Image (cartoon, rainbow, N blue to C red):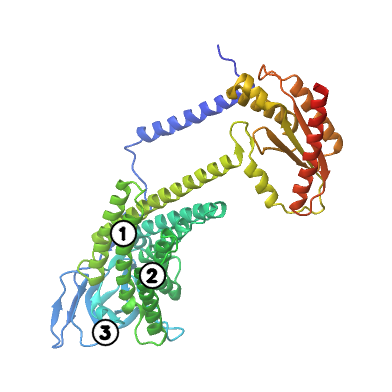
């Protein structure tokens, strides 16, 4: 039979009500499965990609099968046209510029215009943007979409166009680019989590290792880059220099953080390969930024140098992971290597323009996530092994500082304490007490060394019961012990001695009766030699007591 307190009964009642509401909500959802849904966004924006045409140099009208498309142009500007007839309310067109100025006209009237302006002049903050232009109600005539390519490869290039209300356009764009944004946020959160854990571990560990921190920061910066690559941040932030920095300056940072990560997993060691990689990274970053500042080449053109070094760095990192982390599970290394190879190949094909569709991009994003998850696992294993090594080192250190048989501090611990002594302010009075068992050799001869060891252990137990709460007991020889305490009153020391004598007289851990001589003195140490001087005094007092105890036995 179970008995519940009032509090437990109330807790069970509340939990029961919670479960009832949950199950009732599920029942309502199932029962109403045929109910008509109410949606704010009934449908995505409609493609507006057919019906476009352009005029060639002879004035001949050339139809465009479907956008996206690229048309020939004798200058940096290119125009495509479409006949428009609206019989109802106004709507919006979603346009996309990729390193381009863009203008939308209807019957020669400008409906929308976007022109890149540089401020300062060396920063033409052009990149890829979405634009939303309003088409007035009951509009008709020839619609003209004009682009001006700011880079040679963007001249005459036209991307997809969507029509609908503003919410439908946002929904369509979000659905097309959400995978990049989600991937970016995953990398950001993963990076922040790894970095925070790394900082906590770095602060508390004795053997400093920054691989976790650098991996977290690397993941965080890549996440920022991917979030910007989604082109969805512009719906919330319209400041062009911000997007330019997020698009281009994050990439040199990725290169720098990749090298720092390589340094961290190799414990900061240097070799010829790393010197070459570091020199190439520094030269590439310096060149592309210098060309940007003097206006010779925009970062959008020279960023391929940085991306090429990504591939070199990834290959070297893959080599390091497989050659210097033999303690990591083979399965983790295989997953990391395969995902790294996949990412590198896809990244190379995107750089040279072999493939560039969203499917390759999605695969690249997925493989990057696998790279960082597997790399995080590898770093975790590496840090865990290091932590286990530190624990073993601490264990060995503790064993060196402990006398295993008696479970008191060892001779090593005693001398380490003295050698590392720093005087307190104000100075404290110490008490040192030396102990030496009487006639241990006779006990060993009569009862054997095994029983003699039991006697020593029983003697140590008496010491611990009497002195351990107020100071530290050290075993400095076979049957020699030292007790050291600070800031303990003389009355307390007297009570501890009385307790010790009682413990020895009435001990029951061994049937063999034993006695011990001891001597103690008080002193106020200012330097290490004061301990040795006090020890000599206590030692003399102990031997004086031992001499008297022998005379009493005659």
Please identify the residue farthest to the top as the structure is shown: 1
Quarter of the image where the C terminus is located: top right
Task: Please state which of the two labelled residues, at mark 2 or mark 1, is closer to the viewer.
Answer: 1
Q: Is residue 159 left or right of residue 379?
A: left
Mark 3 Cα-neighbour bin, 10 Å: few <14, some 14–19, many ≥20 = some
Q: The residue tagged with tag 2: helix, strand or loop?
A: helix
Residue 6 - label: none
Residue found at x 67% / y 44%: 414
Could you tell me residue 543's position as x and y percent?
78, 35
Q: CA distance from mark 3 to mark 2?
A: 30 Å
| Residue 460 appears in view | yes
Residue 77 - label: 3
Is disc 1 in contact with disc 3, using a CB cutoff of under 8 Å?
A: no
Q: Which residue is mark 1?
A: 318
Q: Which residue is mark 2?
A: 251
Name the foreground residue: 85 vs 477.
477
Q: Quadrant of residue 258?
A: bottom left
Residue found at x 69% / y 18%: 508
Task: Please state which of the two labelled residues, at mark 1 or mark 3, is closer to the viewer.
Answer: 1
């Amino acid at each position: 039979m179970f008995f519940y307190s009032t509090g437990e009964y109330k807790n069970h009642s509340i939990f029961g009500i919670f479960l009832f509401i949950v199950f009732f909500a599920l029942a309502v959802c199932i029962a109403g499965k045929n109910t008509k849904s109410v949606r704010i966004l009934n449908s995505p924006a409609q493609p507006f990609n057919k019906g476009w045409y352009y005029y060639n140099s002879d004035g001949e009208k050339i139809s465009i099968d479907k956008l996206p498309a690229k048309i020939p142009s004798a200058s940096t500007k290119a125009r495509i046209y479409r006949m428009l007839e609206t019989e109802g309310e106004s709507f919006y067109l979603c346009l996309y510029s990729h390193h381009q100025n863009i203008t939308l006209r209807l019957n020669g009237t400008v409906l929308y215009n976007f022109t890149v302006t540089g401020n300062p002049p060396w920063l033409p903050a052009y990149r890829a943007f979405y634009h939303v232009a309003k088409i007035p109600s009951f509009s008709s005539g020839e619609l003209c979409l004009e682009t001006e390519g700011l880079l040679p490869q963007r001249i005459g290039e036209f991307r997809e166009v969507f029509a609908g209300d503003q919410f439908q356009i946002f929904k369509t764009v979000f659905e097309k680019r959400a995978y990049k944004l989600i991937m970016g946020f995953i990398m950001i959160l993963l990076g922040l989590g790894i970095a925070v854990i790394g900082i906590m571990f770095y602060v508390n560990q004795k053997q400093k290792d920054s691989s976790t921190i650098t991996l977290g920061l690397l993941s965080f910066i890549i996440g920022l880059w991917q979030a910007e690559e989604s082109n969805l941040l512009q719906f919330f932030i319209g400041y062009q220099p911000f997007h330019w920095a997020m698009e281009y300056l994050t990439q040199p940072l990725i290169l720098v953080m990749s090298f720092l990560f390589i340094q961290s997993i190799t414990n900061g060691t240097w070799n010829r390969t790393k010197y070459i990689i570091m020199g190439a990274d520094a030269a590439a970053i310096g060149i592309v930024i210098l060309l940007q500042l003097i206006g010779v080449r925009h970062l959008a053109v020279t960023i391929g140098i940085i991306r090429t070094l990504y591939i070199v760095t990834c290959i070297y990192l893959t080599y390091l992971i497989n050659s210097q982390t033999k303690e990591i599970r083979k399965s983790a290394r295989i997953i990391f290597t395969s995902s790294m190879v996949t990412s590198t190949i896809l990244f190379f094909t995107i750089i040279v323009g072999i493939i560039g569709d969203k499917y390759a991009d999605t695969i690249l994003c997925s493989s990057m996530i696998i790279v960082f998850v597997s790399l995080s696992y590898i770093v975790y294993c590496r840090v865990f092994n290091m932590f286990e090594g530190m624990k073993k080192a601490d264990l060995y250190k503790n064993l060196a500082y402990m006398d295993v048989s008696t479970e008191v501090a060892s001779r090593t611990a005693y001398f380490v304490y003295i050698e590392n002594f720093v005087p307190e302010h104000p100075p404290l009075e110490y008490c040192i007490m030396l102990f030496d068992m009487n006639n241990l050799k006779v006990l060993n001869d009569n009862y054997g060394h095994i029983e003699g060891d039991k006697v020593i252990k029983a003697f140590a137990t008496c010491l611990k019961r009497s002195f351990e709460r107020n100071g530290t007991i050290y075993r400095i020889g076979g049957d020699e012990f030292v007790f050291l305490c600070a800031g303990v009153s003389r009355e307390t020391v007297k009570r501890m001695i009385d307790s010790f004598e009682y413990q020895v007289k009435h001990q029951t851990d061994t049937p063999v009766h034993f006695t011990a001589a001891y001597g103690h003195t008080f002193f106020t140490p200012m330097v290490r030699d004061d301990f040795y001087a006090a020890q000599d005094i206590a030692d003399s007092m102990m031997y004086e007591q031992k001499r008297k105890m022998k005379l009493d036995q005659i």
